[in-house]
Image: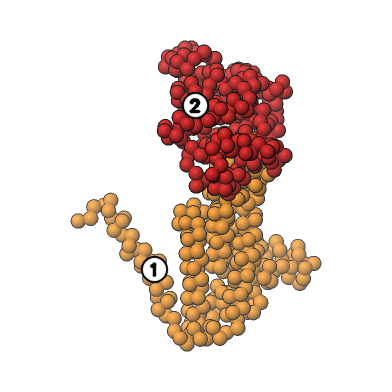
């Protein structure tokens, strides 16, 4: 289980997260909505340990990891751009965590099959389309056997036609993984397909909502949280 | 009629050809068969060529190695005093007169502190020639790595760290391989800059024919001796070597890569 407790974070004098709290159960995919600059990516980077919060706690499976560096958190992270290691093949990218004793080599076949990467294992990232790069990035994060998964607009580079198939695949893979997942997207349809629960981030504060429509309504109003984004 | 805004563009071709291309063309036109035969038959010309290439390769390799270390600080320790000092001093060898650099090297690595290595310390040896070349060429390698890091992006490191890498592991396993082009560009630029170095080399390494003489000082010696034809032949050889290096750098790293490294 992932718990984010009263997290504050500022870039210099500019506060980005102001007391964000949320929790995600194992197997739950919580979609984070918010306008540009609302702190969605910052929140994911704080949970990953890339950024250190000014205040608050990050708790994973009951363990306070706030002071731990990213390498000690066992968090799977897919940044906005797929960011594959350019000198490694698809296979090398997916199994990268084996170098650090993480991941099970026997899981490779299953992940590759689920994400439709069988034909691409020996290719380099620059030979892949945006959609396939996203698949590899997700496979790499999952292969490392994470306790939490953080996906920051993982399908933003994918064209709409390919997205339909990919969203379904991603949902299936995430169901099987069964780890708490934070999923950032701007696309309501994508959110509806992959999400179990929804959080709107506005003005540095997080509000849980029940549906995608409610999230969009909140975003439109903006002032629902008492301030502009 | 040319407007004032078009004037700069119109002035470029004549100025460029007059001040940059014309001297090179004149040098090439002054090449004579006698001068060529004289230079190619001179054993000191060949030892100078050998010294130049050997020391320039060594300096460029050392420059890249140090630049890789600088890159680590650029990525992970940008707030440290060491990084700030290094970043500031990276431009110093470009601005500093190279005679001053040579004198500094002579005082630092000469007999005063390195008497135990010989009568003159490291001075007037091929090691001195290499260190002089390194001093003036390292900034180019450092800037090449710095420019490369801006392109590689921090995302690679961050992802590698979530997969279990420490900062040093992420740098070695992910960043350095992704910097191949920048490192190659840094090596070639450092090598090219080393080929052309004269002042720092002559101050610290000396100009001992057959021992520490390099092509740049060989040309100087031939001119001083009034042997202009041999000097021109050696100069044209240098020019061709430099053009080959520039062409190689551009073809391997792309013209954009070369500009990034220089900028």
Q: Image quadrant of residue B225?
A: bottom right
Compared to residue B2, the image places residue A199 above or below, namely: above
Q: Which residue is mark 1?
A: B21
For image coordinates 76% across by 62% down, the residue present is B113
Residue projecting furthest to the left? B1
Tell me the shade of chain B: orange
Q: Which residue is mark 2?
A: A185
**Picture coordinates of residue B101, whole percent (x, y):** 61, 61
Same subunit: marks 2 and 1: no
Compared to residue B235, the image places residue A35 above or below, namely: above
Q: Quadrant of the N terminus of chain B?
A: bottom left
For image coordinates 56% across by 27% down, the residue present is A172
Tell me the shade of chain A: red
Q: Residues within 10 Å of mark 1 (few under 14, many from 20)?
A: few
Q: Secondary structure at mark 2?
A: loop
Q: Secondary structure at mark 1?
A: helix
Answer yes or no: do the residues labelled 2 and 1 have beta carbons within 8 Å?
no
Q: Chain of mark 1?
A: B
Left or right: where B246 falls relative to A96: left
- Can residue B218 be seen here? The reply is yes
**Picture coordinates of residue A43, whole percent (x, y):** 57, 25
Q: Name the residue nearer the viewer: A150 or A50.
A: A150
Left or right: where B1 falls relative to A158: left
Q: Chain of mark 2?
A: A
Q: Nearer the viewer, mark 2 or mark 1?
A: 2
Q: Name the residue nearer the viewer: A66 or A132.
A: A132
Residue projecting furthest to the right? B116
**Picture coordinates of residue A208, whole percent (x, y):** 54, 14
């Amino acid at each position: 289980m992932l718990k984010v407790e009263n997290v504050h974070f500022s870039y210099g004098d500019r506060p980005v997260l102001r007391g964000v709290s949320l929790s995600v159960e194992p197997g739950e995919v919580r979609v984070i909505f918010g306008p540009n600059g609302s702190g969605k990516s910052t929140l994911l980077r704080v949970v990953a340990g890339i950024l250190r919060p000014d205040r608050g706690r990050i708790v994973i499976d009951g363990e306070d990891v706030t002071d731990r560096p990213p390498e000690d958190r066992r968090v799977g992270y897919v940044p906005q751009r797929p960011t594959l290691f350019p000198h490694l093949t698809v296979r090398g990218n997916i199994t990268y965590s084996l170098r650090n004793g993480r991941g099970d080599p026997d899981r490779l076949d299953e992940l590759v099959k689920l994400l439709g990467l069988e034909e691409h294992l020996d290719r380099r990232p620059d030979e892949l389309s945006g959609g396939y790069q996203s698949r590899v990035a997700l496979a790499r994060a999952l292969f490392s056997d994470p306790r939490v998964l953080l996906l920051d607009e993982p399908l933003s580079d994918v064209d709409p036609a390919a997205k339909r198939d990919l969203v379904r695949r991603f949902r299936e893979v995430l169901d099987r993984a069964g780890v708490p997942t934070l999923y950032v997207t701007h696309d309501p349809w994508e959110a509806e397909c992959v999400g179990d629960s929804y959080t709107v981030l506005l003005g540095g504060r997080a509000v849980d909502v029940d549906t995608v429509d409610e999230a969009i309504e909140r975003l439109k109003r903006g002032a629902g949280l008492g301030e502009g984004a | 009629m040319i407007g004032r805004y078009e004037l700069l563009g119109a002035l470029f071709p004549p100025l460029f050809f007059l001040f940059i291309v014309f001297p090179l063309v004149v040098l090439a036109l002054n090449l004579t068969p006698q001068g060529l035969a004289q230079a190619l038959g001179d054993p000191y010309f060949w030892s100078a060529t050998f010294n130049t290439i050997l020391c320039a390769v060594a300096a460029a390799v050392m420059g890249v190695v140090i630049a890789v270390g600088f890159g680590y600080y650029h990525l992970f320790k940008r707030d440290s005093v060491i990084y700030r000092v290094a970043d500031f001093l990276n431009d110093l060898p470009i601005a500093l007169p190279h005679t001053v650099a040579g004198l500094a090297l002579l005082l630092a690595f000469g007999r005063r502190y390195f008497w135990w290595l010989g009568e003159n310390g490291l001075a007037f040896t091929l090691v001195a020639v290499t260190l002089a070349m390194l001093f003036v060429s390292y900034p180019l390698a450092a800037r090449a790595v710095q420019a490369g890091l801006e392109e590689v992006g921090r995302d690679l490191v961050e992802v590698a760290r979530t997969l279990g890498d420490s900062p040093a592991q992420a740098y070695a396993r992910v960043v350095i391989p992704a910097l191949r082009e920048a490192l190659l560009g840094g090596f070639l630029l450092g090598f090219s800059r080393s080929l052309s170095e004269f002042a720092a080399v002559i101050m610290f390494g000396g100009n001992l024919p057959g021992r520490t003489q390099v092509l740049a000082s060989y040309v100087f010696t031939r001119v001083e001796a009034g042997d202009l034809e041999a000097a021109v032949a050696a100069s044209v050889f240098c020019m061709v070597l430099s053009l080959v290096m520039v062409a190689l750098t551009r073809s391997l790293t792309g013209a954009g890569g070369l500009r990034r490294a220089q900028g």
